[in-house]
Amino acid sequence: MLDINLGKTIELLMGDTERRKFQPLFKAVYSIIAACLLVDVATPLPSAFSVSAQLLFGDDTGPHSHLKPFCAIIFLALGLAVFDLGKTTLEEEVLMHEDLFCHSSTRRTITRFIAAILIAVYIKALLLMFKSALGDGEYLIRAGWMMLAAVGLLIGLGLYVFLGAKAEALLYHTRKR
């Protein structure tokens, strides 16, 4: 009759004991980073609310009053991107138990981070295009480059997900035999 701890035995056999020792420290650091990101969302929001209030209740007819809605959108998009990054960090690194040997969880984490960045880049590129259409044409070239970068990032992400899924399916079928 033997009484063994199955979890520790598997950790020992898979060489995972050292990583497990540092896991609480890693979770604490990720928690601090996620908390700071979520607090940082409060930075652009007051500016967005202020500009929105001026648009709703003010009668600003200055030379650049037509650009004020874009300022509010930029601040809100920045807040959304930072919030999404903080939320993703909290969910993926602190709350979720992640198996380092499971490729699909790693692919999902990378996909979520890149998607958050991709959305922020697309929003910024669209805002620059709108700003150019309203008469400030100097931003058109930058908007085009940002849109091209976002398309490249999207294509790269698509290839990464596609090839990663194919590799994982191949690995699954190889192990099944």
Image (cartoon, rainbow, N blue to C red):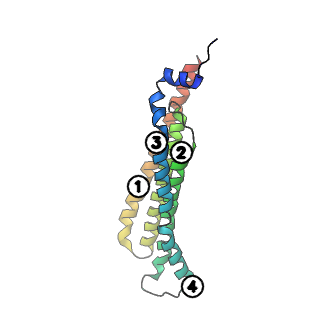
Marks 4 and 2 sit apart, C-alpha to C-alpha, by: 42 Å
1 vs 3, front mark: 3
Q: Which mark is residue 94?
A: 2
Task: Answer whether labels 3 and 2 touch (C-beta < 8 Å).
Answer: no
Mark 1 or mark 4: whose residue is earlier in sequence:
4
Residue 12 x/y as whole percent:
49, 22
Contact check, label 2 and label 1, Cβ < 8 Å = no
Among numbered discs 3 and 2, the one appearing first in the sequence = 3
Q: Amino acid at mark 1?
A: Leu
Residue at x 47%, y 33% (from the top left corner) = 21
Q: Secondary structure at mark 4?
A: helix
Please name the amino acid that badge 3 sits on.
Answer: Leu
Crowd rating for badge 2 (residues with CA inside 10 Å; few <14, some 14–19, many 20+): some
The residue closer to the viewer here, 132 or 69, is: 69
| Placement of the C terminus among the 4 image quadrants | top right
Q: Measured from the top left, where is residue 9 in percent x and y?
A: 54, 21
Residue type at the position of mark 4: Phe
For badge 2, the amino acid type reads: Val
Distance from Cα at disc 3 to Cα at disc 2: 11 Å
Q: Mark 3 = which residue?
A: 25
Q: Which circle marks residue 148 in the picture?
A: 1
Foreground mark, 1 or 4, reads 4
Q: Residue at x 51, y 77 (%)?
A: 50
Element class at badge 3: helix
Quick check: 168 above or below 115? above
Residue 118 lies, with reference to residue 23, above or below; the image says below
Image side of residue 139 versus residue 168, left or right: left
Q: For the residues labelled 1 and 3, say whether their Cβ atoms are less than 8 Å apart.
A: no
Q: Residue furthest right?
A: 1
Residue position for label 4:
57
Asked if labels 4 and 1 touch by Cβ distance under 8 angstroms, the answer is no
Q: Nearer the viewer, residue 1 or 135?
A: 1
